[in-house]
Amino acid sequence: MSKDTVAIRVDSDLRQRLDKLADAFGQTRSSIINDALRQYADHQEWQVNLIAERARSIAEGRAKLIGHDDVLAGFEQRFADK
């Protein structure tokens, strides 16, 4: 996989933390940052895809929708004795 260079600015505290992590794992700062960005991108893509699927489900009438008042009543009933 080819690598592109992306310049970012971080505060000195974060840079020190990244350097400590890189040292602890025997990796480079760049690999630590790549791992973090990959995890972030994976999570954000998952959320975007989930929201899109839920929107399709609603648009196609496949979703069971519950009104706000019904949700509150359910919570009140569930936690009434706690």
Image (cartoon, rainbow, N blue to C red):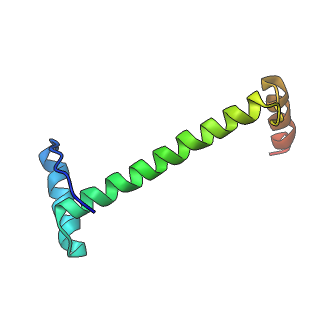
Q: Residue furthest front?
A: 2
Q: Residue at x 69, y 37 (%)?
A: 54
Task: Please state, as top left, top right, bottom left or bottom right, where the C terminus lies in the image.
Answer: top right
Classify 49 as above or below 60.
below
* Residue 12, position as x, y percentages in the image: 12, 47
* Residue 46 in picture, x, y percent from top left: 53, 48
Q: Point out the residue furthest to the left here.
A: 12
The percent coordinates of residue 60 (x first, y second) are 78, 31
From this view, report whether residue 53 is shown above or below residue 4.
above
Would you place residue 39 above or below residue 68 in this image? Answer: below
Q: Position of residue 8 (x, y in %)?
A: 17, 43
Image quadrant of residue 22?
A: bottom left
Q: Is residue 29 left or right of residue 47?
A: left
Residue closer to the observer: 64 or 2: 2
**Picture quarter with the N terminus:** bottom left
Question: Relative to the observer, which residue lies in front, 30 or 81?
Answer: 30
Viewer-proximal residue, 23 or 42?
A: 42
Q: Is residue 41 left or right of residue 77?
A: left
Residue drawn at (45%, 52%), measured in percent from left and top?
42
**Residue 34, picture quadrant:** bottom left
Label tally: 0
